[in-house]
Image (cartoon, rainbow, N blue to C red):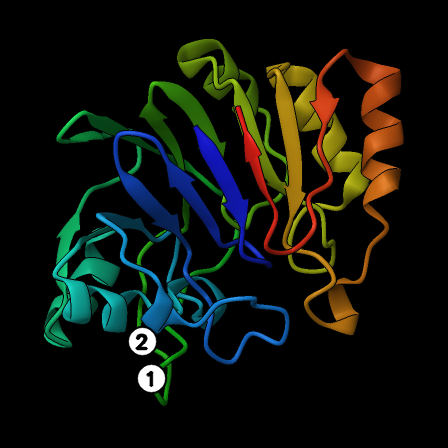
Amino acid sequence: MEITWLSHSCFELKDSMDILVDPYLEGNPLSPRSQSELEPNLIAVTHGHADHLGDAGQISKRTGCLVVAIPEVARYLNGLGANAEGMNIGGSLRVDDVILHMTQAIHSSGITATNPPICGGDPAGFVIDDGIKVYHAGDTALFSDMKLIGELYRPEVILLPIGDRYTMGPKEAAIATSWMRPHVAIPMHYDTWPAIKQDPTEFQSIVETLCDTEVVIMDVGETIEC
């Protein structure tokens, strides 16, 4: 699988399908791509905040690709003319050869693209199984059921927020990594704005004291193979 970090929490996963997660591109000060450059087969949205829902609706309307999200977010996107399907926490959905498992996240989730914001249901994460199992935690605090996510789905790659203030910080993300013990952990959701400025090597150094997971600190726009 090819994994490309498009900054913040946006990743492109390419194997049997081209999958975008949390496509916050337009208006993102760090994004290396515009939404018009991307042609995904599938989009997964973790929650309704504008820096995660991002350009999902515009990309879906332009390409016809399916967006998978919590039902409240899916209904909002369908109201915009996108092609969205809802699923819920604890459930699974197969799209061709890809299986998506929706997991819990501890955060808020209002749809902030509207004025005033409207209900976005619950925040979530995803374990995306396209040959390689990738856990995208979404925006979340540390919670003990991450141990269960590790035991149940055994993700080989995990994508964890480290920005603090609005999500876990480096220490908490390192603890989550030690519970799940994937092959690779990749930090995300940091440095986009001053409020979430972090040194990812702090996360890396703590993980090294807790387990043998490889921490890969990606540059924006970088692609790795897993």
Q: Residues within 10 Å of mark 2 (few under 14, many from 20)?
A: some
At x 53% / y 23%, what residue is drawn? 226
The circle drawn on residue 182 is none
Q: Percent from the top left, x then y, of residue 10?
A: 49, 54
Q: Percent from the top left, x then y, of residue 97?
A: 18, 25
At x 54% / y 56%, what residue is drawn? 6
Which residue carries the number 1 mark? 114
Please, what is the three-letter code of the amino acid marked with disc 2?
Answer: Ile
Q: Nearer the viewer, residue 154 or 147?
A: 154
Estimate the spatial distance between the alpha carbons at disc 2 and disc 1, rounded to whole Å: 7 Å
Specify the quadrant of the image occupied by residue 126. Answer: top left
Query: Is residue 45 rendered to the left or right of residue 28?
Result: left
Quadrant of the image containing the N terminus: top left
Please, what is the three-letter code of the amino acid marked with disc 1?
Answer: Thr
Seen as rendered, the residue at the extreme bottom is 115
| Above or below for 188 versus 35 | above
Q: Nearer the viewer, residue 188 or 178?
A: 188
At x 51% / y 16%, what residue is drawn? 150
Specify the quadrant of the image occupied by residue 19. Answer: top left
Which residue carries the number 2 mark? 118
Q: Nearer the viewer, residue 208 or 223?
A: 223
